[in-house]
Amino acid sequence: TTGKEADHDDCHDLLIASLPKEKGWSSHQLYLYQGFWCPSVYIREEMAAQHFQARQKDIVLAINPKSGTTWLKALAFSILHRQHYTPSQNSPLLTSNPHALVPNLFLFQGFVDQDLNSNNAHSTRLLATHLPYHALPPSIKSLAIGCRIVYLCRNPYDTFISAWHFFTKASDSLEPLSLNDAFDMYCRGIFGYGPFWDHMLGYWKESSERPQKVLFLKYEDLKDNPILHMKRLAEFMGVPFSIEEENEGLIEEISRLCSINNLRELDVNKTGKFFPHFENKAFFRKGEVGDWVNYLTPEMVARLDKVIQEKMVGFGLTF
Ligand code: A3P
């Protein structure tokens, strides 16, 4: 390392040491950085991501962890690149995990040499992030540059259960969190990229004020009527489905390709490992709405209801 890099590392360590911290959901502690809880390992990347230069045609997928990131990546990728691939025959999703096809913002540099995310200024780049709206790189928020953001929101009850399963069963956590401890942390806002209410409301407000900039989708709506919401998504992304495509059943085909039952059974998702600490199969559990009723006691539901009521009342976002 050069002297300059060493100085930079020192500053970084000092910054981290000055932040409030809590035990995390996995082996990584969470630090309160810029108003949200961030796994320590990602703070440096997130600082670097602030320099990201968005382009007008970029589409950024923003999602709370465990709220359907994998699904939205699969859908947006398939919709955007449908000229090149037939869903059931040669879609890259048949051999690659969705996370390998849509890079996270701070990993983006590693992906630029991929054809699909080519650096060609005229192509549409698809990126994903868990960052809350206020912490996005300025160029993404810039109205002058005009890139677009798709937010996928999932009800906090199912998100919590999904996260608890993921971090206790699928991760490298040495001492898995009990359901009660995890729930207490979640209700206090201590969850990666959370509090969840700030995450949702940040994008919700932006989408209410600037619907052309931020499309707000709900996991439950997508489950309920995938065709309708995939059409909204395609339109927003600037690649609406044509009447011919609709009549040929292409939307249904993409929906089927991206369904959890289909993706989960593919070899790449049964045995592959894209992220160093998680197997691909950990991203496909049940994919249902309402699984929380099997886990939360009436007292827990009452507590979470109260948190939602206190933090989110008056904004018009309901679950
Ligand atoms: P459950 O744990 O409730 O099953 P993320 O992708 O943000 O990590 O979110 C993971 C959640 O999305 C998990 O929820 C997972 O099962 C669900 N999921 C993954 N792929 C999906 C798909 N194609 N359709 C619907 N849900 C999906």
Image: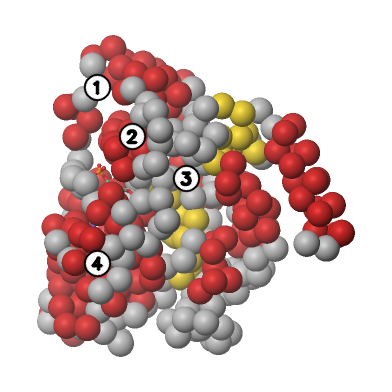
Instruction: Kindly identify which residue carries mark 4.
Output: 268
Q: CA distance from mark 1 to mark 4?
A: 33 Å
Please rate how many residues cluster around mark 4, counting C-alpha atoms within 10 Å: few if below 14, some from 14 to 19, many from 20: some
Label 1 C-beta lies within 8 Å of the nearest ligand 1 atom: no
- Inter-mark Cα distance, 3 to 2: 30 Å
Q: Image quadrant of residue 115?
A: bottom left
Mark 3 or mark 4: name the one nearer the start of the chain: 3
Q: What residue would you read off at disc 3?
A: 204
Is there a contact, CB below 8 Å, between mark 1 and mark 4? no
Q: Which residue is mark 2?
A: 168
Residue at left 41%, top 75%? 238
Q: Looking at the image, is mark 2 or mark 4 earlier in the sequence?
A: 2
Locate residue 135, reporting x and y percent: 62, 48
Q: Nearer the viewer, mark 1 or mark 4?
A: 4
Q: Quadrant of residue 166?
A: top left
Please tell me the numbered disc located at residue 296.
1
Residue kind at label 4, given as amino acid type:
Val
Inspect this view and state whether residue 79 appears: yes
Distance from disc 2 to disc 4, alpha carbons, whole Å, reads 23 Å
Going from the N terminus, do you reach mark 1 or mark 4 first? 4
Relative to 113, 90 lies left or right: left
User: Could you tell me which secondary element the residue under label 3 belongs to?
Assistant: helix
Three-letter amino acid code of the residue under disc 1: Leu
